Amino acid sequence: MSDIDARQIERMKSLLASQQDAFARDRHRPLNERKADLEAVQTLTAAHAGEIADAIASDYGVRSKAETQLGEIGFVLASAKHALKNLDKWAKPQKASVPMTLAPGKAYVRREPKGVAGIVSPWNYPYQLAIAPLIAALAAGCRAMIKPSEYTPATAELMQRLLGERFSEDQVAVVTGGPSVGEAFTALPFDHLFYTGSTHVGRIVAKAAAENLTPVTLELGGKSPAIVTESYETKDLMKPLAWGKFFNAGQTCVAPDYVLVPNRRVEEIGEALIATVSDFYPDLSSDDDYTAIVSQKHYDRLSGMIEEARAAGARILQPEHDAEAARAARKIPPTVILNLPEDSPLMQEEIFGPVLPVLGYELLSGAIDFVNGRDRPLALYVFSKEKSQSRRVLEQTMSGGASVNATMLHLSVEDMPFGGVGKSGYGAYHGERGFLEFTHERSVFEAPVWHPSRLIAPPYGKMFDFIAGLQKR
């Protein structure tokens, strides 16, 4: 551990103590103050959108500004707007009916902030995946500490400055540092820990949180499949599939990780995808709309997986490009892989890059079995013109979320929960579900000064038998 990391670890322990003290003094932040917090996040995001885009581009080398606007800035603004619109309703106590045997009395659920939240955010959407959970935490009335990824230092430093200008550190704080800082961060006794990242690290985070019995939200990933049925035409498939896969150069947790298509259409769909991305990115090595791979480590990993597939006999399809210029820009061209062996690393690990295996199936039941034979994915996509087929896929598979005849769009609906299932994570957020993730739902029963329940105290007799009889009915 470096001296810098050691200082950061001591600093974050001090920050946690100050936030815990502040929460103890003010457990129930008024709604008008919470709304002011959300408005502040909204305002600083809009006012500094250019700086945010520049910082992310600096971290990536090349990051499409259009994709940053859509996937980061616009997403955060929509999230804050939705929370502001609905906060009064979300925070309102929820009435519960009282059974006759407990009357008279009043029952309700108070929605109270859990306390101090820890948010660990990844590098692939470094602003959105830090600030969207923060919006949920602030709406719930929590205080929060954020640990951004060390792969995106410029964005982390910008968030630290912008949030520091609006929020005191006993309410919102950003802690930067490497893996040792992240490890120490997840071991802190937060009231809730929110982690977005890989399944491998998610296991480590869950174990660390368990030592403190800290509740955890794990937003992980997995191999999200796309299933194309015979009824769906190739021309209708191309744009939604190519956009969902190659947005942010495939560095998206809900990007299609592989696509299952009827056997006879494997070559046709593979070649059509390459034609489509050639139109998307006419000169990808110099095109600022095509995002670079975030680091040399990730670039080398993806390149190695492609070459391993080639050596195993797979057919590699890529658009025409200047290989040297692309390598210098740390860009991997959109890559479609055909005839890929099932034991290839590309079919065993989440790809998280612009590489799409296209696999054939004989019957739709076989495609469903293929998906069900693997870990439950974060997302699933089905393309079909026949509702009975799309319904069949949805009914016979399980995934965190799904889109029909589209990719990624389900996560943009604020009124739906977003999260995984099984090894793709647990817990969820967005909209009210995010508010509830940072909320303790406290059940309350209020009885009058005298209540009939006094009649069932020992010694038990006829009154007890009467009331117990009512309960059995």
Image (cartoon, helix red, strand yellow):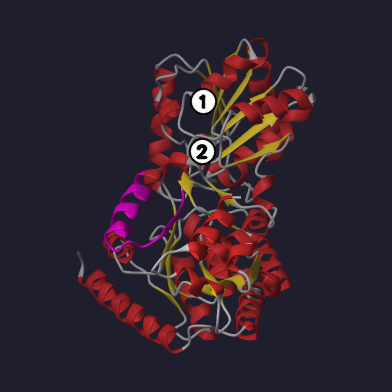
Crowd class of label 1 (few under 14; some 14 to 19; many from 20; radius 10 Å)? some
Amino acid on which disc 2 is placed? Ile
Q: Residue at x 45, y 72 (%)?
A: 157
Residue bearing mark 1: 372
Q: In this orientation, which residue lies closer to the viewer: 132 or 213?
A: 213
Q: Residue at x 67, y 28 (%)?
A: 273
Q: Quadrant of residue 85?
A: bottom right
SS at mark 2 in the image: loop
Circle on res. 332: 2
Q: Quadrant of residue 388?
A: top right
Q: Residue at x 45, y 26 (%)?
A: 347
Q: Earlier in the sequence, mark 1 or mark 2?
A: 2
Considering the whole magenta stretch, tell me its main secondary structure: helix
The residue range painted magenta reads 200-219
Q: Residue furthest front?
A: 462
Amino acid on which disc 1 is placed? Asn
